[in-house]
Image: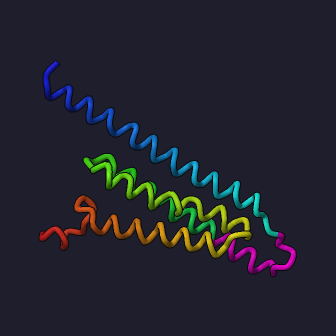
Amino acid sequence: MSDLSVSQASSVGARVPREVLLYAAVGGAGLAGVLVGRWLQAGTGDMEWQLVLLLRFMAIVKGAMAFAALALVQWRLRRPASARLALGYAAALIPMTLAPGLIWSLAAIAPGAALFHAGFILFLVLAWRDDAVALPSRRGL
């Protein structure tokens, strides 16, 4: 086996666990959000039904945004990336996937929104600073 094939094999092997860990962390955070939300379950009896619909739709939109961010991170991590950057992206995605479950339950709307927006801002800053995701104008093209 040549040195080139060994380095390629180790590169592929290093990427797979990173993606698996990312999926496990993000999936676990999403599940935790749903479970904590169910545990804190607030009654919707004192809320107008229109408000309940609005807040639950907001939770669905935030879940879709978290899913889109996960897809972008998955695309980004298929290219060489430092462990620090991968950890940063995971740290951004975890609160983004935790938040929709909290918001859906209507028991922790403000903390859920704060978690989501903190993770989203971190995600945007990381993507902005990541040279592999930079816009052509930032690359000097």
- Residue 38 image point, x, y percent: 75, 58
The image quarter in which residue 139 lies: bottom left
Q: Please say if 110 is above or below 130.
A: below
Residue at point 61% right, 69% down? 112
Residue at point 76% right, 58% down? 39
- Residue 22 image point, x, y percent: 45, 47
Residue at point 68% right, 74% down? 55
Residue range highlighted in magenta: 43-58
Number of marks? 0
Prevailing SS of the magenta stretch? helix
Residue 44 is one of the magenta-drawn residues: yes
Residue at point 54% right, 68% down? 116
Q: Please say if 72 is above or below 106.
A: above
- Residue 58 image point, x, y percent: 62, 72
Question: Where is the C terminus found, in terms of image quarters?
Answer: bottom left
Does residue 1 appear to the left or right of 129 in the view shown?
A: left
Residue 29 is one of the magenta-drawn residues: no
Does residue 24 appear to the left or right of 8 in the view shown?
A: right
- Residue 122 image point, x, y percent: 41, 68
Q: Is residue 110 or residue 105 the one in the foreground?
A: 110
Q: Is residue 138 or residue 25 the one in the foreground?
A: 25
Which residue is most to the top?
1
The image quarter in which residue 33 lies: bottom right
The image quarter in which residue 34 lies: bottom right
Question: Where is the N terminus found, in terms of image quarters?
Answer: top left
Q: How is the image coloured?
A: rainbow
